[in-house]
Image (cartoon, rainbow, N blue to C red):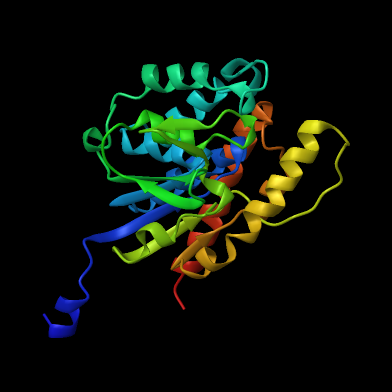
Amino acid sequence: MDILDFIISKPYNVGIALSGGGVKSLCHAGALKALEEQGIKPDIISGVSAGAVVGAFYADGYSPSEIAVLFEDIKFRTMTRIHIPDGGFFQTDIFQDFLYRKLRAKTFEELRIPLRVVATDLDNGKSVTFSSGNLIDPIVASCSLPVLFKPKTIDGVNYVDGGVLKNFPVSTIRNDCKKVIGINASPLVAHNYKLSILNIAFRSYHFMFKANMLHDKELCDLLIEPVDIGNYETFGVDKGREIFELGYQSTRQLLASKLKPK
């Protein structure tokens, strides 16, 4: 081994970063299936918001197809309940119970693949990466869109959606991996929209989250970004299977173009 290789040696060979994107993050599962078919599996995963959910289940030993089935049970109206605003219009206790029931691992240490979950420290205005201890609370925190959902309190600190400051967590694993594959479920597109409270909120978050992704996209050795994913709504659960298939086919095509003989 060259001395330089020794100095810059990294603990993980392949890392995968999963962006936020609501139900659109089902494309992550489809992409993971296509990567598996080429013998590519991550040594570490980083996820934010819904990407953290997919990452957690995959790190817990669920197959991509099993994750797709699980997402069919994650519906906005059934996973949250409205209440008198106290930090947010919706509570996430039902979603939290779902995670406790479905995830076999309850701590990061119990996962089969190391995982890093990104959330936003609302009290101190900074991005925080969780990688040890309780697994469920950081995932809930990472998914807690400000205003819509009440912040998740962990050790006396209030946390909201990790996408507020880092919606594509490539940088959280970049220095520890020889190669990083980034899967982005939130490409920057601007479609027509209806004037409603939810649509305006989601559209505003959409633009805000995209703005903080540019640097992390440049850090990827391989960027998987299904362009057509922008045609789907953040909470369009009825399109889950289409989104999964889009991620799968887009990744297959990208890998075929990268792996074909020159």
Residue 180 picture quarter? bottom left
Q: Quadrant of the N terminus?
A: bottom left
Q: Position of residue 195 (x, y in %)?
A: 88, 36
Residue closest to the eye, 197 or 109:
197
Q: Residue at x 67, y 22 (%)?
A: 85
Q: Position of residue 94 (x, y in %)?
A: 51, 16
Q: Residue at x 54, y 19 (%)?
A: 73
In the rendered image, residue 250, in percent from the top left (x then y), is placed at: 58, 52
Tell whether 152 sits left or right of 100. Answer: right
Give me the residue at 33% from left, 52% from top: 39
For residue 56, side relative to residue 240 (left or right): left
Seen in the picture, residue 95 relative to 59 is either above or below; the reply is above
Q: Is residue 42 visible?
A: no
Along the viewing direction, whichever of 39 and 2 lies nearer the viewer: 2
Q: Is residue 207 above or below residue 69?
A: below
Q: How many marks?
A: 0
Residue 156 seen: yes
For residue 82, what is the image quadrant?
top right
Q: Is residue 208 above or below residue 262?
A: above
Q: Nearer the viewer, residue 60 or 68?
A: 60
Q: Is residue 102 above or below residue 262?
A: above
Examine the image and state in which quarter residue 24 appears.
top right
Residue under the image location 44 percent in, 43 percent down:
33
Residue 217 horizontal/vertical position (percent) = 53, 65
